[in-house]
Image (spheres, rainbow, N blue to C red):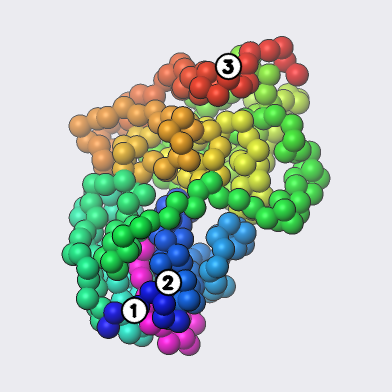
Amino acid sequence: MEISRDSQASILLVELTRLGDVLSAIPAVATIRCWFPNASITLLTRTPYTAFLREAVSGVRFFELPDSRTIGGFLSLLLLVRRTRWSLACSLGPGRSNGLTVLLSGAASRVGYLECSPSETPFRRSNPIFCYGTLPKRVTAFGLESIADRSLKVCSALGIVEHVNPFPLSISSSGAAAAQAVLSLKGIHTGEGYMVIHPFSGWNYRSWPVTHFIELMQLMLDRFRWRIIVMGQISEQQQFQVFRQIFQGNRRVMILPSSDLIESAEVLRHAVLMIGNDSGPLHLAAALGTPAIGLFGPAEPSLTAPTPVSPDRLISVYHRLGCSPCDQARCLYPQNSCMQQISVAEAMRAVEHMFQWHTAGAAGSNA
């Protein structure tokens, strides 16, 4: 069954994996929203992201999800999904939860990554796109390509020929005001110039050594007049301790543990520069149009880097090894890993290059 562009279809889009994957899927969500203007579009994603996505993505409904990572939570998720008679359900990325949810959704047509494969390193294998109940316009697969192309290939399988670029994302004035009020209580004022460091990652082997981040921060404090905000999740409190110890009493360094994505987005949106590992906050900075420097290792930038608003808004630092891209489960060179091969001097050159591009943040006396 094919769905006409002017039909009042109920369309379910599913992306239940990580923040970077969800942000990479937003162009596909916007494209499907534009292609089916009369349809009711629902995006099923993880609850921590929904408040921000409601701010940033218009014309789309969101489900408040149970925890789908347990068997009971996943069954509750399926019961929630099956309350609606979907005309079309799409899995926008590889992953067991995505594929199973779409396959069991009861939708008349199901399209996308339905193989239910592990999602840890989908960039290392070919991921076919399946079409059930609808005639695919073009049989295709995703593999060893940019993460930005992954969900858009689902659009192509649906016969959509014009893609929408919704970046940079924006936050409503009311949402921004609420976030700024909370940040001001923490001593952070977005109208003042600052750089953001995000030194953490959900993957050990994607993490640049913390000692390197500290050395880079010391160089940046000497070289530029901006303050530095070290940002991360509340769950990373223990990892923040070394930054608190090293920079204790330094009024130009602020620590911001936060699990509120709107709050994090508001901080990133006003930053003059963001520096971080290959992780969700790097994708968030790029989606907001903030100049960013990404540090890459197990997966090369051509596979997992975010798509910047313009080429001069992202610098990727990377050393390709013979084992790249890897499965991230173990390291063949733990004493000299791909992330360790990125030197502090190299990262500092990228910072200076970015500021040269934007003729901002010129060297000055300490504030």
Q: Which residue is mark 2?
A: 36
- Given the image, on which type of amino acid does mark 3 rest? Leu
Q: Quadrant of the C terminus?
A: top right
Q: Give the residue displayed 67% in from the left and 23% down from the top.
A: 226
Instruction: Find numbered disc 3 in the image and state the secondary structure of the residue it sits on.
Output: helix
Front residue of this view, candidates 335 and 128: 128
Reading the chain from its start, which is encountered first: label 1 or label 2?
1
Instruction: Find numbered disc 1 in the image and state the secondary structure of the residue it sits on.
Output: loop
Q: Give the residue displayed 63% in from the left and 13% down from the top.
A: 363
Q: Which residue is mark 3?
A: 219
Residue 330 lies left or right of residue 36; in this view the side is left
Q: Which residue is mark 1?
A: 3
Residue 334 lies left or right of residue 233; in this view the side is left
Q: Quadrant of the N terminus?
A: bottom left
Magenta-colored span: 77-92
- Given the image, on which type of amino acid does mark 2 rest? Phe
Q: Nearer the viewer, mark 1 or mark 3?
A: 1
Label tally: 3
Q: Residues within 10 Å of mark 3 (few under 14, many from 20)?
A: some
Q: Residues within 10 Å of mark 2 (few under 14, many from 20)?
A: many
- Given the image, on which type of amino acid does mark 1 rest? Ile
Q: Answer yes or no: do the residues labelled 1 and 2 have beta carbons within 8 Å? A: yes
Q: In the image, residue 39 lies at what x, y percent?
A: 46, 76
Check the image and report above or below for 96 versus 265. Answer: below
Front residue of this view, candidates 13 and 280: 13
Reading the chain from its start, which is encountered first: label 1 or label 3?
1
Q: Is residue 270 magenta?
A: no
